[in-house]
Image (spheres, rainbow, N blue to C red):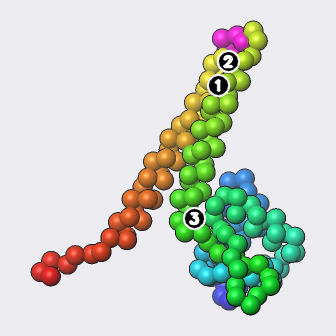
Amino acid sequence: METHAETEFVESLGLILQAEGFPRIAGRLLGIFVLRGKPVSFQELSEALQISRGSVSTNTRLLESLGAVERVAMAGERQDYFRLTDAPYERIAAGKVERAKQASERLLKGRDALPNCDDSTFQRVTELSDFFNSISRACSVALAEMQDKRADASRPRVVAGE
């Protein structure tokens, strides 16, 4: 990293993602993509964070699976480059909506298949399903807000008197 502030930002994002259950390195990598805003080579990522190529590979694959980054080819280059996808946070939110919805549905299906399910077990499993359903709905609202902001930002501004 070039400055202390950039290093702090990258490390902070690592801690934020770690608190959410992701590897700290994935958050640190995401921090680099956010700051750079352009394709970054596999080698640059390894050197910037002083991590192994294996760690770069594992964690960029994770970020790819979340829809946050994508692999890109650079003319004349043999190594892999990565960059933020278009609307990466919307993609992450959309994935969360779908995963939480599926979890809720699986829990209800599993609950209904339980033999001799007593009332208290039925209630606990239902509450867990409701928890995931609530997360799905909340993430849907967040996703809609992000999409609205992006749509508003892309609209041409009309200035009074023009």
Disc 2 to disc 1: CB gap under 8 Å: yes
Q: In the image shown, does 108 or 11 lie closer to the viewer?
A: 108
- Residue at the image point whose x is 27% and y is 75% from the top: 157
Instruction: Give the SS element for disc 1.
Output: helix
The residue singled out by tag 3 in the image is 88
The residue singled out by tag 2 in the image is 112
Q: Position of residue 138 (x, y in %)?
A: 50, 44
Q: Position of residue 21 (x, y in %)?
A: 72, 53
Q: Which residues are magenta?
A: 117-121
The reply to whether residue 46 is visible in this rendering is: yes
Sequence-first tag of 2 and 3: 3
Q: Residue 65 is drawn in which quadrant?
A: bottom right
- Residue at the image point whose x is 62% and y is 23% from the top: 126
Disc 2 to disc 3: CB gap under 8 Å: no
The residue singled out by tag 1 in the image is 108
- Is the stretch drawn in magenta largely helix, strand or loop? helix
Q: Is residue 67 above or below residue 47?
A: above
CA distance for labels 2 and 1:
6 Å
Packing grade of label 3 (10 A; few <14, some 14-19, many >=20) is some
Q: Residue 99 is drawn in which quadrant?
A: top right
Q: Is residue 134 magenta?
A: no
Q: On the picture, is 90 further left or further right than 104? A: left
Q: Is residue 140 above or below residue 2?
A: above
Sequence-first tag of 3 and 1: 3
- Residue at the image point whose x is 67% and y is 31% from the top: 106
Instruction: Give the SS element for disc 2.
Output: helix
CA distance for labels 3 and 1:
31 Å
CA distance for labels 2 and 3:
36 Å
